[in-house]
């Protein structure tokens, strides 16, 4: 079981999820079908989780080192976020969005064959590695989801039927995402102290993670004190997401990238 | 739309100060900082160390308490404890850190960058002044909530006080932080370390290196282009570890690893298991070209500092080579010897530092040209007396994050 089997597994997952999405769409007309959609989503999700677990066992190290492995985790987490928001707050469109994004990440992985490398440098062999990375990935996925909500908010605004509920969903997601972002940042600091002797070195990735954190901090405070200024809040949320994207993908292209301990070895 | 009629327009600088005034003050501080930066063109970094940083911290907290309890009714303090002041200072700190995220923090040729100190943001006056306002806001708001304590404030206090502690202690603690690196050699005592600026520092104890150990992964197999020497298969992603009996497919070659030795020596035209200083790994592989069924067999080895490498040429275009093994684990078996001769034996490993007499010892590196035959182990020694305060702040924030995750949900559930 390695990435060689990925086309097979991702094909099965893909089939379940696409049919699930179609059923979800029909369920806007025929309500009870939502159950069927959720069953299809769940089945696909289980297959994906089986793949992740087997890959982990086979690689003999956490599959969290390369960009492809990271994308695999997004595909695994997005359904979870979709399910949580659906069962808590009943957002159907958001459930659909989560699965579409998960499919996109699977597709990118399918088109970019992945490394089979089993090696893991000593500094990464730490009890902090898994929590640090998982917490971050989860946080990014949730915060990315909050920006989709922001885009919907803008669109609704433009159409003239903006509802404050949309912003409240964004708030929920930002609170969840932000608390995980804080944990990711702090776990990283504790780990860095164990591995490199200092908890914070202003490494480029750290700088941008800090900036992302500050961006969402502005949003949280702004929202809390100006609950009715929805347009400004949406703008702040969009800007914070731009910073997050730089942190996520862009750092490697900045002039500061040379010296980062975080650049992925692909 | 009848809101507009009830909303009375406020003049600039009329109480309460809003965003315009807040940014006015914040940007004013920042520009002052940049002027100071230009004026004090000395290249040296400004840091304060014990006991002055402790005085500073005590003074700062006293200053905040006096501000809050004595001048609590002034326009200034009321402004500092409201959101516009906080948001403007968060935005300005963010902007300055963003400069750090774009301009490399190394000596620069660029006049503007150097004069404004954009390549040393963490000790830049503009940053320090803006951060001072930031911490003042944070400190005052924390005092406010602590004095108005109720259970619902716990999350707030964990987050804000935690951040305040972690940041102030982190900033002020840099002056007392010592990071030394010490070269140790097998079967020798070492106690002369160097700091970041290559100054010599004599340690109050010595370190005796009994043994430096390295565990390696097996080497990997790579298909390379004869002409360019670049890895030809799938942009270097799919490199497999070499092990006896493995079969792999690289492009249109089927590879079978028939023999593999972890340490070996070349004898005539073949390799044999040998365990000398610098004996490299080697493997005997057989490669079948799927297109024309031709088979090539031969030895490959990555070589070492003492021996040349050996590749296997398949045809005019491609060869198979063995990559240099990557380290899996490295560690130093050491004795720490105090001035009066007491020995403390321990093993240092990456991610497993050891605490001794207020110092923390880390396995840093080794002579990577020599790889597993390195006689040198570099040990890093760190002393950071402010760490307990910083950790208190960090753990408060961790608790605060859990609280936020939990309550963030609750608020919406009740609505
Ligand atoms: C760990 C980072 C932070 C988190 C998680 C956080 C979170 C929050 C939350 C959730 C609130 C509103 C909830 C409540 O009133 O109980 C709040 C209020 C506030 N925060 Fe923060 N905050 C953080 C950092 C900061 C910083 C750095 C500043 C200022 C520089 C600041 C200034 C304020 C102010 C002024 C209020 C209003 C308090 C009041 O009016 O009583 N916060 N914060």
Image: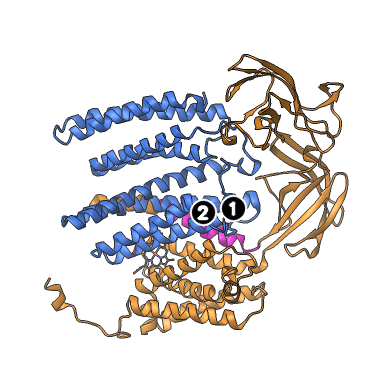
Chain colours: A blue, B orange
Left or right for B187, reference A201? right
Residue closer to the observer: B157 or B415: B415
Q: Which residue does the numbered mark 1 point to in the structure image?
A: A260
Residue B401, magenta (yes or no): yes
- Asked if the residue under mark 2 is in contact with the one under mark 1, i.e. CB atoms within 8 Å, the reply is yes
Task: Name the main secondary structure of what is drawn in magenta.
Answer: helix
The residue positioned 62% from the left and 37% from the top of the image is A120
Residue closer to the observer: B316 or B247: B316
Residue closer to the observer: A121 or B415: A121
The image position of residue A87, as x and y in percent, is 26, 39
Q: Is residue A53 above or below residue A145?
A: above
Q: In this view, does B72 lie above or below B199?
A: below
The residue positioned 58% from the left and 17% from the top of the image is B291
Q: Compare marks 1 and 2 and give the one earlier in the sequence.
A: 2
The image position of residue A63, as x and y in percent, is 53, 35
Q: Quick check: can you spot residue B152?
A: no
The image position of residue B120, as x and y in percent, is 60, 69
Q: Give the range drawn in magenta.
A: B385-402
Left or right for B126, reference B368? left
The residue positioned 15% from the left and 78% from the top of the image is B6
Dot 1: chain letter:
A
Dot 2: chain letter:
A
The label shown at residue A251 is 2
């Amino acid at each position: 079981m390695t990435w060689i089997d990925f086309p097979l597994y991702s094909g099965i997952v893909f089939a379940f999820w696409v049919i699930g999405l179609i059923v979800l769409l029909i369920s806007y007309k025929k309500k009870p079908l939502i159950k069927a959609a959720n069953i299809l989503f769940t089945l696909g999700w289980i297959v994906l989780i089986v793949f992740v677990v087997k890959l982990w066992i086979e690689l003999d190290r956490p599959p969290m080192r390369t960009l492809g492995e990271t994308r695999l985790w997004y595909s695994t987490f997005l359904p979870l976020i979709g399910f949580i928001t659906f069962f808590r707050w009943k957002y159907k469109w958001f459930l659909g969005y989560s699965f579409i994004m998960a499919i996109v990440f699977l597709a990118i992985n399918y088109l970019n064959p992945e490394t089979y490398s089993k090696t893991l440098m000593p500094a990464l062999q730490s009890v902090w590695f898994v929590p640090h990375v998982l917490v971050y990935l989860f946080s990014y996925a949730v915060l990315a989801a909050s920006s989709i909500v922001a885009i919907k908010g803008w669109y609704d605004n433009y159409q003239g039927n903006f509802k404050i509920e949309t912003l409240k969903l964004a708030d929920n997601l930002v609170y969840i995402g932000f608390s995980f972002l804080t944990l990711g940042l702090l776990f990283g600091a504790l780990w860095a102290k164990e591995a490199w002797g200092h908890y914070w070195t202003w490494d480029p990735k750290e700088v941008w993670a800090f900036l992302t954190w500050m961006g969402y901090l502005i949003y949280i405070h702004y929202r809390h004190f100006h609950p009715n200024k929805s347009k400004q809040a949406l703008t702040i949320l969009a800007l914070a997401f731009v910073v997050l994207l730089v942190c996520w993908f862009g750092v490697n292209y900045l002039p500061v990238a040379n010296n980062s301990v975080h650049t992925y070895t692909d | 739309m009848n809101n507009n009629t009830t909303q009375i327009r406020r003049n600039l600088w009329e109480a309460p100060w809003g965003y315009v005034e807040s940014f006015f003050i914040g940007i004013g501080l920042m520009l002052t900082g940049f002027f100071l930066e230009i004026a004090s063109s000395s290249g040296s970094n400004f840091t304060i160390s014990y006991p002055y940083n402790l005085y500073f911290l005590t003074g700062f907290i006293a200053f905040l308490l006096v501000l809050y309890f004595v001048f609590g009714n002034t326009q200034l303090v009321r402004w500092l404890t409201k959101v516009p002041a906080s948001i403007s200072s968060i935005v300005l700190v963010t902007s300055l850190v963003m400069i750090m995220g774009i301009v490399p923090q190394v000596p620069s040729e660029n006049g503007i960058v150097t004069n404004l100190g954009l390549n040393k943001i963490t000790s830049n006056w503009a940053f320090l002044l803006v951060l001072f306002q930031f911490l003042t806001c944070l400190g005052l708001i924390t005092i406010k909530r602590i004095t108005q304590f109720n259970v619902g404030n716990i999350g707030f206090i964990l987050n804000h006080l935690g951040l305040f502690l972690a940041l102030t202690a982190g900033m002020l603690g840099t002056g007392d932080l010592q990071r030394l690196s010490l070269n140790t050699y097998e079967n020798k005592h070492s106690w002369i370390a160097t700091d970041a600026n290559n100054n010599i520092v004599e340690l109050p104890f010595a370190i005796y290196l009994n043994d430096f150990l390295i565990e390696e992964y097996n080497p990997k197999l790579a298909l390379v282009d004869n002409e360019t020497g670049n890895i030809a298969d799938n942009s270097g992603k799919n490199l497999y570890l070499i092990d006896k009996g493995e079969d792999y497919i690289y492009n249109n070659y089927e590879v079978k690893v028939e023999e593999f030795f972890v340490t070996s020596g070349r004898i005539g035209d073949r390799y044999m298991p040998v365990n000398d200083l610098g004996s490299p790994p080697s493997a005997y592989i057989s490669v079948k070209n799927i297109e024309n069924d031709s088979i090539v067999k031969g030895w490959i080895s990555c070589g070492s500092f003492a021996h040349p490498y050996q590749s296997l040429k398949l045809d005019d275009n491609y060869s198979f080579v063995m990559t240099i093994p990557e380290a899996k684990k490295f560690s130093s078996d050491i004795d720490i010897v105090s001035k009066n001769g007491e020995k403390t034996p321990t093993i240092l490993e990456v991610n497993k530092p050891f605490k001794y007499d207020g110092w923390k010892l880390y396995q840093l590196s080794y002579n990577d040209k020599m790889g597993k035959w390195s006689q040198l182990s570099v040990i890093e020694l760190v002393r950071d007396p402010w760490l307990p305060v910083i950790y208190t702040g960090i753990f408060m924030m961790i608790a605060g994050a859990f609280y936020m995750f939990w309550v963030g949900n609750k608020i919406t559930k009740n609505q």
